[in-house]
Amino acid sequence: MPGGRPRTFDEDEALERAVEVFWRQGYEGTSVTDLTSAMGVNKPSLYAVYGGKADLFRRVVAHYAEHEMAYAQAALAEPTALGVVHRFLNDNVIALTRDDKPLGCLSIQGGLSCSTENQDVAQFLAASRLAGEKAFADRFRRAIQDRDLSAEADPDALARFLMVISEGQAVHAAAGVGREALQQTATIAEAAFKALCG
Amino acid sequence: MPGGRPRTFDEDEALERAVEVFWRQGYEGTSVTDLTSAMGVNKPSLYAVYGGKADLFRRVVAHYAEHEMAYAQAALAEPTALGVVHRFLNDNVIALTRDDKPLGCLSIQGGLSCSTENQDVAQFLAASRLAGEKAFADRFRRAIQDRDLSAEADPDALARFLMVISEGQAVHAAAGVGREALQQTATIAEAAFKALCG
DNA sequence: AAAATTTTTAACCGGACGGTTCAGAACCAG
DNA sequence: CTGGTTCTGAACCGTCCGGTTAAAAATTTT
């Protein structure tokens, strides 16, 4: 089996560069030329390796969910519902305001609303956010079974409230609101959860 | 003073059509052709009357703020801080889920993140949102003076929390989450405010 | 060294983009 | 009816878009 000319780029490293471009500029605000120059990949290779702009975006979102949103999975593993909320809100603020990454959250900035031809991008991102909400709702359901949360609590409503806050924080972060201000909001939100649940 | 050929469109009516297009598709997702066909205005007239895509967008945002966000001004006029919060959160949900208008909120969908050449659009929208937040903060400051809110309350933090929730609701609405679900979230948020303030 | 394979470079599609020009149609005042 | 003015419709800019092609360069295998 022959080898062929070696690549001048690392597939995963280039993908991480693509994450940052889409994160900063959104799907429609990003051109293939933006991508190739940031990734250090020439156009034919981009199409051969990643399959085009739309396919690359899907891989970017998957990579982002796995690496930049790992804190959400970690939060779900906390032993109590209020622990889940505390950890998620706090780590969310950290993730939204890292100075070595773009501000805000890819899954919102990537394409909250798109032209008619790219509606599928917006829907794809919306669906992935709602999937995250469902994970929290399931976690709260388990907390009710565990007698950790009151049986009167509405797990779906609590999860929705949590995600609404997280999305609002992301919008704020994208606008340049600083980490300290967001942390203050997270603290307030956590107090609200304590008042609502316990 | 001569008259000249009359226009085939009404300037304000056409502007309202433009509002809906930008609202649905965002600044970068909207082409001038999208605008002309939705507005019933031909290209030279669009440039003569509105000055081009970027200038039109500014007029669109101003029109939107005045007409579709009037409820925010009305909410600020409520006699108590909790009344402000109640009215704003409830009317916000209504505005985000009207079936005769696009879902969500123009000032977020319009351009949360843009390509490098359109960063000014994103910043313009962000600044207008933060101006709204400041209006709520000022209102809460007055509530403290009025002994309506505790002197220990942080008006800036409360206003930020309120806007974060409103922005998160807008993201949810854009994703297609229904009015009833958002109303439930608004109720929860209001309860949180009551617990935090009173 | 030669054959086979893969990636690079650069040129090149057709089409859509934002924006403009210009002839002519439709109105007004005199 | 005529001259001045304003808007319409369509053609037309140069540029960039996402995506492709063809040949040259860099490898491994034989």
Image (cartoon, coloured by chain):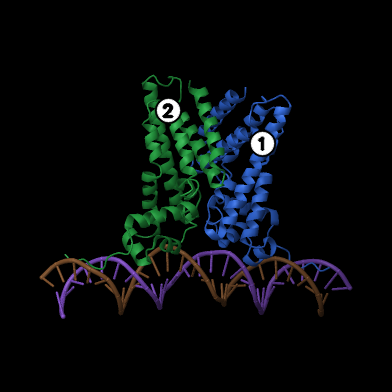
Chain colours: A green, B blue, C purple, D brown
Please rate how many residues cluster around mark 1, counting C-alpha atoms within 10 Å: few if below 14, some from 14 to 19, many from 20.
many
Residue at the image point whose x is 67% and y is 49% from the top: B63
Quarter holding the N terminus of chain B is bottom right
Residue D13 vertical position relative to residue D7 in the rendered view, above or below: below
Image location of residue B51, percent across then percent down: 67, 62
Image location of residue B8, percent across then percent down: 68, 61
Residue A167 numbered mark, or none: none
| Residue at mark 1: chain | B
Q: Please name the amino acid that badge 2 sits on.
A: Gly
Residue D25 vertical position relative to residue A69 in the rendered view, above or below: below
Residue where numbered disc 2 is placed: A83
Please rate how many residues cluster around mark 2, counting C-alpha atoms within 10 Å: few if below 14, some from 14 to 19, many from 20.
some
Which quadrant of the structure image shows residue B78?
Answer: top right
Residue at the image point whose x is 55% and y is 36% from the top: B165
Which quadrant of the structure image shows residue A154?
Answer: top left
Task: Note whether residue B74 is visible.
Answer: yes
Q: Nearer the viewer, residue B130 or A142?
A: B130
Residue B157 is left or right of residue D30, and the answer is right
Q: Nearer the viewer, residue B38 or A68?
A: A68
Q: Please name the amino acid that badge 1 sits on.
A: Phe
Mark whose residue sits in front, 2 or 1: 2
Residue where numbered disc 1 is placed: B136
Numbered disc 1: secondary structure: helix
